[in-house]
Amino acid sequence: NAGVTQTPKFQVLKTGQSMTLQCAQDMNHNSMYWYRQDPGMGLRLIYYSASEGTTDKGEVPNGYNVSRLNKREFSLRLESAAPSQTSVYFCASSPRDGFNQPQHFGDGTRLSIL
Amino acid sequence: AQTVTQSQPEMSVQEAETVTLSCTYDTSESDYYLFWYKQPPSRQMILVIRQEAYKQQNATENRFSVNFQKAAKSFSLKISDSQLGDAAMYFCAYRGVNYGGSQGNLIFGKGTKLSVKP
């Protein structure tokens, strides 16, 4: 099925380890996003890529880096994981044009940092 | 900065009854979009309904409808004939068209957990 695919679905890391979360979409969307969701909070934007070749910080970028590898793929990297980064991470995509177009979300990655 | 507030952390409704979830937002923009997303236990984020701020007519999608009050900056979701499958977290989200350099980004409320009683 067409959509946004995230890998892995679950991961446990030790403090200080590094990790890359992968995201790919097959809807030919221009824009891609990474969010984190914590208990009692809505989704908060970490980084986004408005189009291939560009990335920008969102609300909570500290401790993360991203790479827009091509139009399809947008990865999120934790260089030195910290317990505060324990969260559920969502990748999303949308067409750049038409702000009424909804963002399409992946199924999320549950990440635990011990 | 834009903010979205959902004042009801939890709500409960009897099956087949109607329930309204509240959402208010703060913005200085005149043009924007509002969305309701549903997140069932499976964790998927599913679009329920959307509303363009320049449209006065309230959006409807089958059993789901909104009451959009632009002057009051209010965007409530009404679910009619509630079904067991409606049980989920519901998130209200705002999307500006001129939000600094981050056009198209969604700003979410903290969510309302809806339970449906059989």
Image: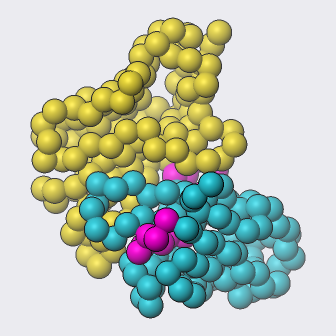
Chain colours: A cyan, B yellow
Give the x, y percent position of residue A12. 85, 68
- Residue A35 appears in view: no
The answer, for residue B75, to whether it is visible in the render is yes
- Which residue: 28% across, 68% down? A97
Indicate left or right for A20 with A28 as reference: right
Q: Quadrant of the C terminus of chain A?
A: bottom right
Residue A90: percent from left, percent from top: 60, 62
**Quarter of the image where the N terminus of chain A is located:** bottom right
Q: Residue at x 74, y 77 (%)?
A: A82
Q: Is residue B10 above or below residue B12?
A: below
| Residue at point 83%, 79% (across, down) | A15
Name the outermost residue toward the front: A1
Quadrant of the rendered image containing residue B73: top left
Could you tell me residue A67's position as x and y percent? 57, 87
Q: Is residue A34 left or right of residue B74?
A: right
Query: Which stretch appears magenta?
Result: A27-42
Which residue of the protein is positioned furthest toward the bottom in this rendering?
A: A53
* Horizontal relation, residue A66 to residue A51: left or right: right
- Between B69 and B6, the one nearer to me in the picture: B69
Q: Is residue B104 magenta?
A: no
As for residue A31 lying within the magenta part, the answer is yes
Q: Residue B49 location in percent, x, y?
A: 37, 39
Q: What is the total number of numbered labels drawn onto the structure image?
A: 0
Q: Quadrant of residue A6?
A: bottom right
In the figure, B61 relative to A94: above or below? above
- Which residue is found at the position 63% from the left and 79% from the top? A76
